[in-house]
Image (spheres, grey):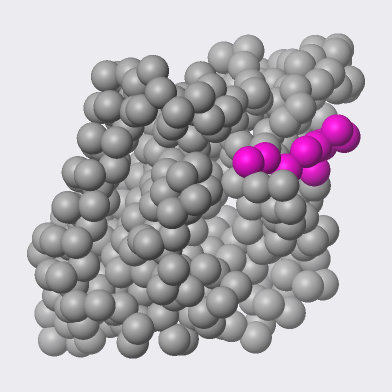
Amino acid sequence: MTTSLSTMIRLRAIQNLTRKLFHELSDIHYRLQYHPELSPAGWYLGRGMFIENYWLHEVIQHDGQFTAEQSLFFSDACPLAQRGPRLPALKNQLDKISAQQDDNDILLMYQSEALGKNPLFENEFIENYIIQNYALLYESIFMVLYQIALKKHQVYKKNHPYKPQAPLVSQALIKDINHIKGAKYSVGGEPLLSFDNELPAHEIQLDDFFIANTPVSNGQYLLFIEEGGYGNQTLWSDAGWQWRADNNIQHPEHWQQSPQQHWYGVNHQGPFDLNINDAVYGLSHYEACAFANWAGARLPHEHEWETAARLEAIKHTAQTWEWCSNIFCPYDGYAAFPEPENKHAKFDKQHYVLKGGSQHSRPEIKRAAFRHAYLPHQRHIFAGLRLVFT
């Protein structure tokens, strides 16, 4: 038994792409913490290698030589502030990871008979599990890179202000919607190809609803700003209004304003002109709800979003993660796998579900059943919204 060539190619691709993100990063940027709720970029790099070694060696072969001294990469064992100082030098880390990944790839390609009989290799479950964890870490690294760019730009723009070539203008909110009829629908993932929180697949009953064909755009969100959305308390929940006031929130996380009062964005490569039709991102759940209230709409329940996506009734589902109205809870019949006591800290009745994917999401997690989850105030993520009308 051996891992298929197609799976090996996918694994090698995400390994190489993740390492490539660090080829032009300095050691200091690799290890500094740029956001209070994000680890340093280098921690996500090391965490990917740790997960790979943990499953392929410690769990499957009972060999802890690669993970025995890796408490740094156990999230619960090392506070965020301690992670950067404990990281090895960037070059040493990249060299070590590259060599170890080569060894692990050979292990997967030429599995011994005893190794291949391990149930975690059934239908290439563990290989796909590792690839999908890499995909999540890959996107987290981009979150850090955006924060690095934002911090750099705050300093640079004082003497070198950015002037958009095509200033963003507001855009009317047009109800381009699709009708989903009330009925029973199937939601949830496929065993061995999904994370445990997507399982089991089950039927749900939905009422009629109308869902926007596309996510809210930059131009539409600018209209919300121009019409005083951030200053109208009636649009916000009590918790959202308090958060907005405490943090002086006036615009999406990745937006900046030129001396001429024109809006532009900042991504991992620096400032850029915002496209009027692109999906807005960098929003908290609080902001998404306020916008939906302003628009006379609401956020979709995750089952509505998933159903519309499965019916191919919505477009552009991978431009931005889209906030849903419901909190992140286990499905009836949920069973933690592959870790028998996986506590899923996000099942705390405080995290909200997001669906879709961003421009930095890997194909391995771009599926209708995939469930992301963040706290309502978090906006460093690449999250926007889609409207539902009833």
Residue drawn where x is 23% and y is 52% of the image = 100
Residue 41, by quadrant, is: bottom left
Name the quadrant of the N terminus: top left
Name the quadrant of the C terminus: top right
Residue 18 locus on image (x, y percent): 26, 51
Residue drawn where x is 64% and y is 52% of the image = 373
From the viewer's perspective, is residue 238 above or below residue 322? below
Residue 186 left/right relative to 122? right
Residue drawn where x is 72% and y is 47% of the image = 340
From the viewer's perspective, is residue 34 above or below residue 220? below
Q: Closer to the camera, 194 or 100? A: 100
Q: Closer to the camera, 44 or 310? A: 44
Please tell me whether residue 332 belongs to the stretch shown in magenta.
yes
Residue 279 locus on image (x, y percent): 44, 42
Residue 181 left/right relative to 176? right
Residue 172 left/right relative to 199? left
Residue 335, by quadrant, is: top right
Q: In the image, which residues are magenta?
A: 330-338
Residue 281 locus on image (x, y percent): 47, 52
Please tell me whether residue 298 belongs to the stretch shown in magenta.
no
Residue drawn where x is 29% and y is 36% of the image = 107
Could one spot residue 310 in this view of the protein?
yes
From the viewer's perspective, is residue 311 above or below residue 243? above
Residue 32 locus on image (x, y percent): 31, 82
- By secondary structure, the bulk of the magenta-drawn segment is best described as loop
Q: Closer to the camera, 334 or 277? A: 334
